[in-house]
Image: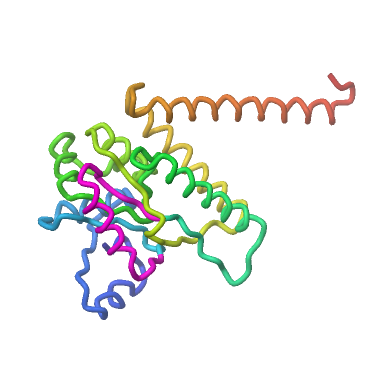
Amino acid sequence: VIDNCTDDTKEVIEGYKVEVFETVNNRNKKSGAINQALNYYNLKSEYLLIMDADTVLEDNAIEEAVRYLEARPKYASVCSKAGVLKPDKTNFLWHMQNIEYSHFDTDRVETNGFILVSHGMFSMYRIKVFKELFKNRGYIYDEDCITEDYELTLAIKHLGYRLGASEKIKAYTKVPMSLKELWIQRTRWMSGGLYAISKYKFNKYTYKDKCSHYLFGIIWTIQIYLLVITIIYRYSPVGL
C-alpha cells in the first residue's frame, strides 16, 4: 500500500513485480491507508498480514504465523516478537528501549490469548474476523485513533476472540534515537490509548487497561506536582 509518497517508492516496488495499491486523498495515515486497500480488494484468502513500512522480517516469519493460527482456531490474530534494529551507533536511549521491548515480549507471553495489543509492527489476522468486524460497525480500522492497532485489538476482543503472540515469529523495527522523537512517540501512544479505551465501557475486556491508564494518570499527576513544588522551593527567595 503506497500512501502519500513523494519519492519514487512506487516505481521501485513495481520493479519487484508485486501488486501495488496507491491511496487516494488519504488524510488518516496508516488506518486510512489500510481501510482503502481493504475496501478495494475482495479478500478471499484466510489470513492477512498487517505490518509497518519499516518492519524487517526473518525469512520464516509468515510461515510461523500461519502455523500458529492453524493450530489455534479460536484465535483471531497472532503478533510477532518485537525486536529492535541495532543502528551503526547506539546510545543510552536505544539500550533502554531494547530492554523495554524485551519486557513487552515477556508480557505478551505471560498474557498469551489476551494480550494488550496485537501490534502494528507485525500482526496476522483471520480474514473472517475482519469481515465480522466490518459487518458489526461498518469499518475495520478506526481512522480517528492514532494507535489503530490498540483500538482494533479492543474491538476484536469484544467479538469474543483471543489474540496471541509467538516468540518464533521474529520481526524488528527502528526506535527513536533522540529525546524529541521519543517524546513524540510516547505522547502519540498515550493519547491514542486514552482515546481507544474511552470508546469502550468498563467490562471484562477493558478493566485491566482502564485501571492501568487511571493509575498511570494518577502517578504522572503526582510526579508533575512534586516536580513543580521542588522547583518552587529551590528557586523561590523565601522558600515555601
Whole-percent x and y of residue 197? 38, 30
Q: Residue at x 72, y 26 (%)?
A: 226
Farthest top residue? 240
* Residue at image location 59% in from the left, 59% down from the top: 177
61 within the magenta span:
yes
- Residue projecting furthest to the front: 71
Q: Quadrant of residue 176?
A: bottom right
Residue at the spot x=89%, y=21% of the render? 238
How far from the left and from the top, in percent, is residue 116? 40, 39
Could one spot residue 144 in this view of the protein?
no
| Residue 187 pos. (x, y %) | 51, 42
Task: Classify the position of the N terminus by image quarter.
Answer: bottom left
Labels in figure, total:
0
In this view, 6 is above or below 154? below
The residue sitting at 84% across, 19% down in the picture is: 240
Q: Is residue 219 left or right of residue 141?
A: right
Q: Is residue 183 visible?
A: yes
Instruction: Give the magenta part as a residue range.
Output: 56-80
The colour scheme is: rainbow
